[in-house]
Image (spheres, grey):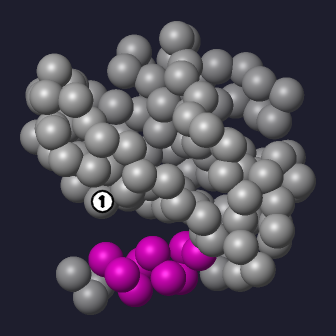
Amino acid sequence: MLFSNLILACHLLVSFALFTNQFMSGEEAIISVAGATPPGAVLVACSVSGAGPTPTQHGAAELSVPIKVLPALTSDSSGMSKISVTLPAALSGAQVWLQAVDLSAGVLSNGAERIVQ
């Protein structure tokens, strides 16, 4: 666990990044971003169709259509933000791809893939 946190901390020093907890059906998924423009608008989007690429005005998103955009977030003074979403039991076993965009900087985060347990 310490090694994973160290990699994450190093990654966050140089870029806008998205990270999550483990996805469990019927429980809360916590989706966080770091390295966003403070304070700025951030969007998180997800897909259950695949990892793209899908062209956007900010570059190639690592999401396939259809893409669901979650409610807009505002990063805090340190460039961090998070959203919690309850995962329906029907998503058990599904793959979910996620990515965020820092609207102030016009950059995409890393893409992430999770399997709902």
Residue 99 quadrant: top right
The residue identified by callout 1 is: 21
Residue 56 quadrant: top right
Q: Residues within 10 Å of mark 1 (few under 14, many from 20)?
A: few
Prevailing secondary structure of the magenta residues:
helix
Element at badge 1? loop
Q: Is residue 102 visible?
A: yes
Q: How far across and how far down the image is residue 35, in percent?
A: 69, 70
- In the image shown, does 32 or 71 lie closer to the viewer? 71
Residue 39 quadrant: bottom right
Residue at the top extreme of this rendering = 66
Relative vertical location of residue 24 with respect to residue 68 in this rendering, above or below: below
Q: How far across and how far down the image is residue 88, in percent?
A: 22, 29
Residue at 16% in and 21% down = 90
Q: Is residue 116 left or right of residue 12?
A: left
Q: Is residue 45 left or right of residue 95?
A: right
Residue at 15% in and 39% down = 26
Residue at 88% in and 53% down = 104
Q: How far across and how far down the image is residue 17, in percent?
A: 58, 61
Q: Is residue 80 magenta?
A: no
Residue at 55% in and 74% down = 11
Q: Is residue 8 left or right of residue 86?
A: right
Relative vertical location of residue 55 with respect to residue 31 in this rendering, above or below: above
Q: Is residue 52 visible?
A: no
Q: Which residues are magenta?
A: 4-12
Relative vertical location of residue 84 with respect to residue 5 in this rendering, above or below: above
Q: How far across and how far down the image is residue 16, in percent?
A: 67, 63
Q: Is residue 93 left or right of residue 68?
A: left
Amino acid carrying mark 1 in the image: Asn
